[in-house]
Amino acid sequence: MSLSAVHSTLSSLKTCQADIGTGMDIVTDVALDVAETAGTENDAVLKKLEVMMLECAKLDQEINCFVEVVNSVTAEVRNQEPEAMFRLKSLVKEKFTERHGSLSEGELQNHVKLVSFKENVRNALKTVNPEAADNMEEELDEDVAVTQSEVNFTCPLTQVEMVNPMKNKKCNHHYDRDAIMGMIKARQNQKKKLRCPVVGCGNTDVKQGDLILDQIMKRQIQKRTSYLRCDR
């Protein structure tokens, strides 16, 4: 197996991984539609959707694990004799089996899109049926679902309305995804921490792992945009 073939395979996997992420976003949107609709069968449907999210998260986790192993092994083999390339497949299989076996259920449950799914569904249920929301497994910090009129849709970084609002789990502030990801990357390149851009916030270390896509706010923004267009 050549290194070019390996790189081609990894590229295909990353494309697949992007499709998985898109699929998880779609499942979350469907779950929010279900949560916002009164019905006795909603709990069962939401559970099925949660199982789908869990399976997608597991597949995404396995791809991440495989890519990490392949990158690690190819880096080692590249500095060895050419004959080592013939053992690349067996080395990857061996290390992947070992690494995959060490993955914990906790890591899976902390998948960013799975966490986002549970939080968004719970918040959507609060607006329809507070009692049903209390039956969800994840206990979240926010106890009151804010209405559209109470939400500030302006990104503190760009000062324009957000498109993909990312919620910071540490301080509960929101930023547009492209803006905050760009700032995080810039600070990482400078080897500096990023302070939350919201005035007065004490969070001095905004990390990508603390950010989740706020699907409910995104839907609110989309509805508001549609309303303003129709009102013109």
Image (cartoon, helix red, strand yellow):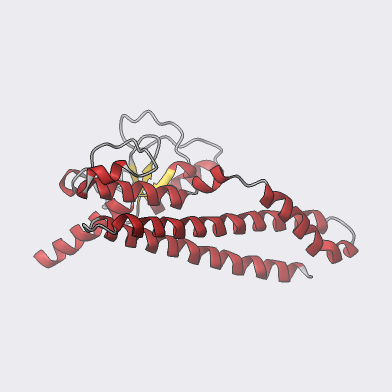
How far from the left and from the top, in percent, is residue 185?
50, 47
How far from the left and from the top, in percent, is residue 201?
34, 31
How far from the left and from the top, in percent, is residue 153?
25, 48
Query: Which sits in the foreground, 151 or 142?
Result: 142
Please say whether residue 162 is visible from this viewpoint: no
Point 18% across, 46% down: residue? 147
Point 67% across, 46% down: residue? 102
Q: Quadrant of residue 4?
A: bottom right
Quarter of the image that includes the N terminus: bottom right
Query: Which sits in the foreground, 129 or 155?
Result: 129
How far from the left and from the top, in percent, is residue 27?
39, 62
Q: Quadrant of residue 5?
A: bottom right
Quarter of the image that includes the C terminus: bottom left
Single out the residue that lies furthest toward the front: 40
Point 45% across, 41% down: residue? 210
Left or right placement of residue 227 versus residue 40 in this view: left
Please say whether residue 34 is visible from this viewpoint: yes
In the rendered view, tell whether residue 182 sits above or below residue 29.
Answer: above
Query: Which sits in the foreground, 47 or 54?
Result: 47
In the rendered view, tell whether residue 55 sits above or below residue 107.
Answer: below
Query: Which sits in the foreground, 50 or 17?
Result: 50
Left or right placement of residue 163 versus residue 210 in this view: left
